[in-house]
Image: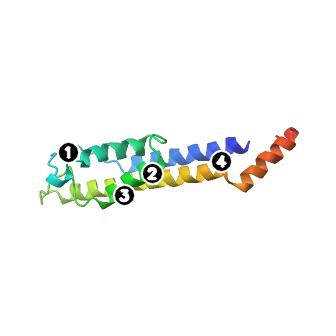
Amino acid sequence: DFLQNTMKTFLSFITILNSSAAFNVQSIRFSRQLTPLMNHHHGLESFERAVECAEKFGACDIEQMEELAKELEEFRGAYFENSDASKPSMMQKEVHDRKDVAEVLRLQSELRRRMDYLNGASLFTKEVHDMEDAYPEHQ
């Protein structure tokens, strides 16, 4: 029962993450001008991996998610949207959305750390399981 409730809570959390991400998506189509700066040659590869990790829970280890989140947070300016002064809102949206991906990576790594603790070192969890094993008729 405890494990089932934990998994239900976990799945609810993931559902909330996915649905909240949907609210950030705009249906506006825009043309991307891929004009990365010279010092951002590895950026696209990191961005692709960060999005993959954020979209697929469990696809990346905790350390990789934290490193990718740090890279996304430290990146300055827009990568895809050029510096056209007539479209500052699109540049701002790109930066905001990139920070959202970084936050999802941080939340996912925190949740995974907590689940690892819960499954391995939590005294409370251990005692609940011991009680279930001692008194199976109460399950």
Q: How far apart are marks 2 and 4 (CA)?
A: 19 Å
Q: Distance between the residues labelled 3 and 1?
A: 27 Å
Dot 3 or dot 1, earlier in sequence: 1
Say whether marks 4 and 1 touch (CB < 8 Å).
Answer: no
Q: Residues within 10 Å of mark 4 (few under 14, many from 20)?
A: few
- Where residue 100 sits, quadrant-wise, is bottom left
Q: Which mark is nearer the camera, 4 or 1? A: 4
Q: Is residue 40 visible?
A: yes
Circle number at residue 119: 4
> Which residue is at 18% across, 51% downward?
81
Q: Depth check: 96 or 132 in front?
A: 132
Colour setting? rainbow
Alpha carbon of mark 2 to alpha carbon of mark 1: how far? 34 Å
Write down the residue under mark 2: 63
- Mark nearer the viewer, 2 or 3: 2
Element marked by disc 2: helix
* Disc with the residue nearer the chain's start (2 vs 1): 1
Q: Dot 1: few (<14), some (14–19), or many (≥20) neighbours within 10 Å?
A: few
Q: Which element type, helix, strand or loop, lies under badge 4?
A: helix
Q: In which quarter of the image is residue 69?
A: bottom left
Q: Is residue 71 above or below residue 131?
A: below
Secondary structure beneath disc 1?
A: loop
- Give the labeled residue for mark 1: 30
The three-letter amino acid code for the residue at tag 4 is Asn
Instruction: State left or right for residue 105 relative to residue 80.
Output: right
